Image (cartoon, grey):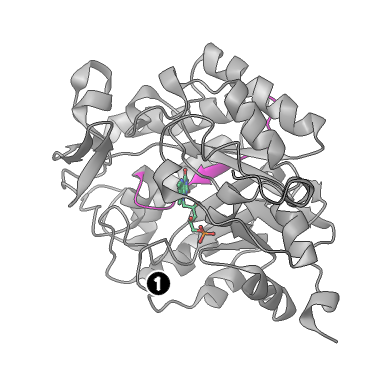
Amino acid sequence: MPADSATDLFLPVRLGSLWLPNRVVMAPLTRNRAPDGLVGELHARYYRQRAGAGMILTEATVIAPEGVGYPNVPGLHSDAQVAAWRGVVEAVHEQGGRMFAQLWHVGRISLPRYQPEGGLPVAPSAIRPAGEAFTPEGGAPYETPRALELDEIPAVVNQYAAAAANALAAGFDGVEIHGANGYLIDQFLRDGSNRRTDRYGGSIENRCRFLEEIVEAVTGVVEAGRVGVRLSPTGAFNDMHDSDPQALFDHVATRLSGRGLAYVHVVEQFPGDEPAPFDFASLRRRFEGAYIANGGYDRARALQARVEDTADLICFGRPYIANPDLVHRLALDAPLNPPDADTFYGGDAEGYTDYPTLDQQRAAPYASR
Ligand SMILES: Cc1cc2nc3c(=O)[nH]c(=O)nc-3n(C[C@H](O)[C@H](O)[C@H](O)COP(=O)(O)O)c2cc1C
């Protein structure tokens, strides 16, 4: 039998406390279209179009003003932001979808211009990342961040929990803790960015403590079956590196297990990164919940992952930007629209809500996007 007809990619699956209609997940995708940190009608339309996903993860959403490092990204730390998200979540629910909020603090990947009162970005250690921050005028070199004082850390942990409570208030089905891609939690995890000498630095156990405390705090307000964690063990994006990623992330997976969490979500390859050796199966074996795989998956790889059982769910990023009806297209093995990278970050409806569905293309085959 061909892999297609044997696959369960398009069949319902349990994920923590939820039932999903299929195993296809929409990746968190920052699109920089939320002035003043507020989502609106445009976002409601965009996410509603993609409600056929087994689950939608929101674009990274900041937990506090200090968590901002890019222009026009949404937040979940004010009443106005909660109210704004409620409209988006309702639109997705009306369309029969499910949606988790991705909780984000960028740490050192910021600039004073994005910080309250122009202060320095915070990080585990005062180590300036190589590379340039993203600003509306172009790239700007990062500055050396300020290392968080030991007694400041509990307040940051609480900001994650407060944002998680806000996510529930906005109607979200759950939350994803963003522990990937070189942002604050990842900065604590990896020894390239964490040189602390207190109980949050040094050993793998210590570097994992910040994430564990966040998970503990978040699951104090959101049931564990509605909480997932995103990790990127091999990611080099945002100047990240570690002396022993396998030992570190095997430990992370072990420590995340036993708590009833819905899933770990693993970025196996970040766009632009070279493939790096890593035993993802080892990480998956150590974690009791579902394993969501992401990074460069297409239809064939997704089907193969299910046939070989290397992942429970498959998450798509760039394909979801360009294909609102991705599940439908994958199920039919229909061609995919190519994404236009020029409209990824910032702008308006163009390159955001105007990608056609297959049905629209079949009704008007010669219409352009
Ligand atoms: C435009 C764009 C925005 C992204 N924003 C986020 C984000 O907000 N949070 C996150 O965890 N990853 C983000 N990523 C990474 C994606 O979620 C995903 O890991 C990556 O695109 C690899 O998946 P793919 O090969 O299916 O595109 C972004 C990627 C792109 C291309």
Q: Residue at x 50, y 15 (%)?
A: 78
On screen, residue 24 above or below 248: above
Label the magenta part by its dominant secondary structure. loop
In the image, 38 versus 299, the foreground residue is 299
Can you identify the residue that label 1 sits on? Answer: 247
49 left or right of 256 in image: right
Highlighted range, magenta? 169-183
Q: Position of residue 315 (x, y in %)?
A: 61, 58
Q: Is residue 80 visible?
A: yes
Residue 353 in percent (x, y) is at: 60, 36
Q: Does 243 lie within the magenta span? A: no
> Which residue is the extreme one toward the front?
366
SS under mark 1: helix
Q: Residue at point 75% right, 45% down?
A: 360
Is 360 left, or right, of 174 in this rendering?
right
Work out which quarter of the rendered image holds the N terminus and state it: bottom right
The answer, for residue 317, to whether it is visible in the render is no
From the viewer's side, name the closer residue of 292 and 354.
354
Does residue 240 appear to the left or right of 33 in the view shown?
A: left
Three-letter code for the amino acid on which mark 1 is drawn: Ala
Residue density around tag 1, few if under 14, some if 14–19, many if 20 or more, within 10 Å: few
Q: Nearer the viewer, residue 127 or 358?
A: 358
Give the residue displayed 27% in from the left and 19% down from the top: 116
Q: Is residue 172 in the magenta section? A: yes
Question: x, y (%) of residue 109?
Answer: 28, 41
Residue 316: image location, x then y, percent: 59, 57
Q: Residue furthest top?
A: 80
Quadrant in which residue 290 is drawn: bottom right
